[in-house]
Amino acid sequence: FSSSDSAIAKLGAETAALILRNDAKGQPTVLGLATGNTPILFYQELIRLHEEHGLSFANVITFNLDEYAGLPPEHPESYWKFMHTHLFDHIDIKEENIHIPSGTVAEEDIAAHCAEYEQAIIDAGGIDQQILGIGRTGHIGFNEPGSPKDSVTRAIQLDAITREDAAPAFGGIDQVPTAAITMGCGTILSARRLVLMAWGEKKAEIVRQAVQGPVCDQVSASFLQEHDNAVFYLDEAAASALR
Ligand code: F6R
């Protein structure tokens, strides 16, 4: 795309069409959502479609990719807070239809919490469309290098590069959590449609590896090459290393 704006306009229209199609059939729409800088414009577009065109999220069920371990919902950097600030507080989604892994579940309950998260996705009928960003380590969700293709929702140690990238928001690397709970690569790949967004030159090299490099667990996003309905929405700068 010539700019992130044109990519977002297309994705917004496609997402609205998906919701309207399911509404007409009396079926819910299940959206997988990401946090970070990348999807903010997309969430603004969804809010605009809600406010100006009456797009309703009353029959939308959401599953977020991940949450930092140790952060309660009200923490300013929690992904719970991020999602409410940037999207949920501005649309008519039902609170009970929102799913975000818990950052505060006790150590001994993490496995059960993750299994319940997987089950909730299955019970909702699976994810129709999963939104993804990409980290400098090639992660999708927080599936850092070494995450198996069939991995499921679990606790994971964050890569040093990922923590470095989060340091400014937390006011220093010491404040950045060392672990997170994330959907696995297998969880993500089970979505019916995957949309990975990337903007700007800083993402160009890792986008090249994801799209044109070997499919391997050192770059989780490369697994998208083996999905039959995965699309990359890139601005020119993020696409500039592709050849
Ligand atoms: C966020 C997530 C991460 C981010 C990635 C890019 O829920 O799962 O994979 O998408 O770290 O982050 P930004 O968009 O801030 O560059």
Image (cartoon, grey):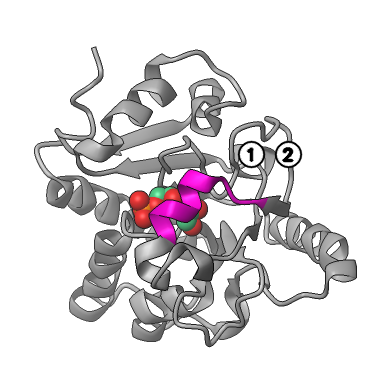
Q: Counting other residues with Cα less than 10 Å from the Cα at mark 2, is it few (<14), some (14-19), or many (20 or more)?
A: some
Q: Residue at x 69, y 51 (%)?
A: 156
Seen in the picture, residue 50 relative to 4 is either above or below; the reply is below
Seen in the picture, residue 93 relative to 191 is either above or below; the reply is below
- The circle drawn on residue 185 is 1
Q: Which residue occupies the extreme right position in the image?
A: 108
Residue 96, given in percent of the width and then of the height, sits at 62, 82
Left/right placement of residue 237 relative to residue 129 reads left
Mark 1 touches mark 2? (CB < 8 Å): yes
Quadrant assignment for the N terminus: top left
The residue pinned by badge 2 equals 151
Q: Which residues are magenta?
A: 157-166
Q: Regarding mark 2 in the picture, which secondary structure is present there? A: loop
Residue in the foreground of this view, choosing between 24 and 170: 170
Q: CA distance from mark 1 to mark 2?
A: 5 Å
Left/right placement of residue 183 relative to residue 116 reads left
Asked if the beta carbon under badge 2 is closer than 8 A to the nearest atom of ligand 1, the reply is: no
Tell me the kind of residue under disc 2: Ser
Tell me the kind of residue under disc 1: Cys
Seen in the picture, residue 131 relative to 204 is either above or below; the reply is below
Q: Is residue 15 visible?
A: yes
Q: Is residue 19 visible?
A: no
- The circle drawn on residue 206 is none
